[in-house]
Amino acid sequence: MALVKCKEFGSEARSKPTKCVKYGAPGVKQQTGAGKIRGGLGILIVGSLISGCCVSTYGAKDGHDPMNQAQSCCKDDLQCLAEKAIVAADTYCKDPIERLATHAVRWTEAPNEMKFSYFRWTDQPGGAITYVGDKAEFRNDVGTYTPIIYQCDLASDGQTVLAVGATAGRLPR
């Protein structure tokens, strides 16, 4: 087997090579950066059009619109209003509850678990909602962690924390 020079790049290869050893098949153009970007943008546009059509027709097929379902809660329906705002309570109540501790706080809930297990009206139906949970531990002066029951009063707008409180203990299961 004799070595011959590649015509395009001058590197040595076996006789009758199908491609240059170092640079790939002769005569094949490598796609430039601009071509890769155009191809990627095309795929992105087609993908977003497909997903946009699926999302926009989802509510019409089932006879309900999930975007308007949250707005359809009655003002005196505790279950509906509390479940709608429980993620906000998880977010907005965490820091005020942590400020109640004199030392460190350790949250014991699982990554996909909510901090609050129960909820109730604070004072009257249609008003603020009190969220109650026990998935935190406060560190005491000795250095051990004590389980606590905490509560957070969230206004009806779902963003304003009215009050927080904590006592030692666990909620009944």
Image (cartoon, rainbow, N blue to C red):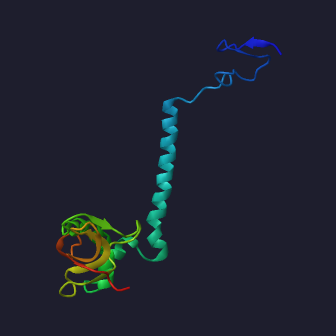
Q: Horizontally, is 64 left or right of 71 in the view?
A: right
Q: Residue furthest right?
A: 1
Residue 92 horizontal/vertical position (percent): 24, 67
Which image quadrant for residue 118? bottom left
Q: Residue furthest front?
A: 142
Total tally of numbered discs in the picture: 0
Which image quadrant for residue 101? bottom left
Which image quarter holds the C terminus? bottom left
Taking the spot 52% from the left edge, 33% from the top edge, the residue there is 35
Nearest the eye: 70 or 83:
83
Residue 53 horizontal/vertical position (percent): 47, 60
Quick check: 94 above or below 25? below
Quick check: 132 above or below 139? below
Which image quadrant for residue 152? bottom left
Residue 3 horizontal/vertical position (percent): 77, 13
Q: Horizontally, is 31 left or right of 142 in the view?
A: right
Taking the spot 66% from the left edge, 25% from the top edge, the residue there is 24
Which image quarter holds the N terminus? top right
Nearest the eye: 66 or 109:
109
Residue 40 horizontal/vertical position (percent): 50, 41
Q: Horizontally, is 159 left or right of 133 in the view?
A: left
Taking the spot 45% from the left edge, 58% from the top edge, the residue there is 52
